[in-house]
Amino acid sequence: MVMNRNDQCWCKSELKYKKCHMEFDEKLNEFKKQGIEVPSKNMIKNQEQIEKIRESGKINIAALDLVGKQIKAGITTEDINQIIHEYTIAQGAIPAPLDFCGYPKSVCTSINNEVCHGIPSKDVVLKDGDIVNVDVSTIYNGYFSDSSRMFMIGTVSDEAKKLVEVTKECLMKGIEAVKPWGRLGDIGAAIQEHAEKNGYSVVRSFGGHGIGLEFHEEPFVCHYGKRNQGMVLAPGMIFTIEPMINQGNYELHIDKENGWTAYTNDGLLSAQYEQMILVTEDGIEILAK
Ligand code: MF3
Ligand code: CO
């Protein structure tokens, strides 16, 4: 589709193309000419969409904060599910995991050797020394948000604490690597470098994802990789960075019974943090913090 300067912009901002994404398109074309992959138009959010996604993110993060206040040894992962479910509904929002591809609960709770997609259960009681990831995804007015955090229950071993800390640092290093007109591979490279320097491995079969209008959008965000490779990062893109870092190797398997929960093959610990990142003209914004 050829756009003229005075046409309304394709991003539905209702601004004229020349005042909105004309320069943006010219810049992307320069990359394209060099054979570099560029984001498609449906990966670029306009101001109105960004604001709606930000609103969704506020509820998402408040739900996680609430879990932070209540989580302790002796409660069950089903208790966490109820905290998230009830809070989300009370805000007029919807827990995105519930019924997503048949997922049975409103949140994922992954303990110790569980890599991700742990399913809450009244039979799973949190105990002293556990490390648990709580992964919350929210739909508000049709807009999606997604973040997760680790919680350490009571006194955890030095090894577990170190894994959790390094995983958080991996997320932060991944976020710092995001630059407008930088590359997707910069993110994975920064994460992989930090994880491996600490003797850990980066999970390969799951990654981050575009988010906002859908739960999982393009692009797929690899948490390992090489600098200066992959898609160009352009203002208006929103995606998650959610590294899963393993104490041992990155091999995993999926629970045969529930079809969801991923476990480390070696039975060692795994940790994960997740945030949503907006690429802006001059940097980034964490949309749910
Ligand atoms: N929250 C996960 C993510 O970060 C997706 C979970 S899908 C579910 O992408 F169905 F398990 F909830
Ligand atoms: Co996610």
Image (cartoon, rainbow, N blue to C red):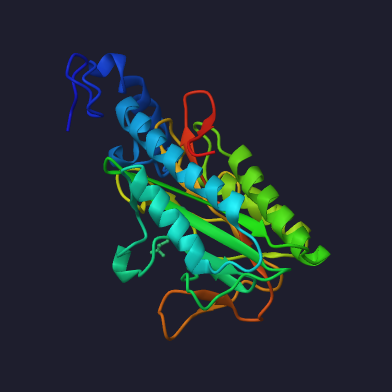
Pick whichever, 240 or 67, lies toward us. Answer: 67
Q: Residue at x 70, y 58 (%)?
A: 164
Pick whichever, 159 or 40, lies toward us. Answer: 159
Is residue 206 at all visible to an observer of this figure? no
Q: Position of residue 162 (x, y in %)?
A: 78, 59
Location of the N terminus (image quadrant): top left
Q: Residue at x 70, y 48 (%)?
A: 169
Pick whichever, 211 or 56, lies toward us. Answer: 56
Is residue 67 at all visible to an observer of this figure? yes
Pick whichever, 39 or 106, lies toward us. Answer: 106
Q: Position of residue 180 (x, y in %)?
A: 50, 31
Ligand 1: quadrant of the figure? bottom left
Q: Position of residue 193 (x, y in %)?
A: 70, 54
Determine which quarter of the picture holds residue 127.
bottom right
Whether residue 132 is situated above or below residue 47 in the rendered picture: below
Relative horizontal placement of residue 176, taking residue 181 as reference (left or right): right
Determine which quarter of the picture holds residue 4.
top left
Q: Position of residue 216 (x, y in %)?
A: 36, 54
Location of the C terminus (image quadrant): top right
Q: Residue at x 82, y 63 (%)?
A: 158
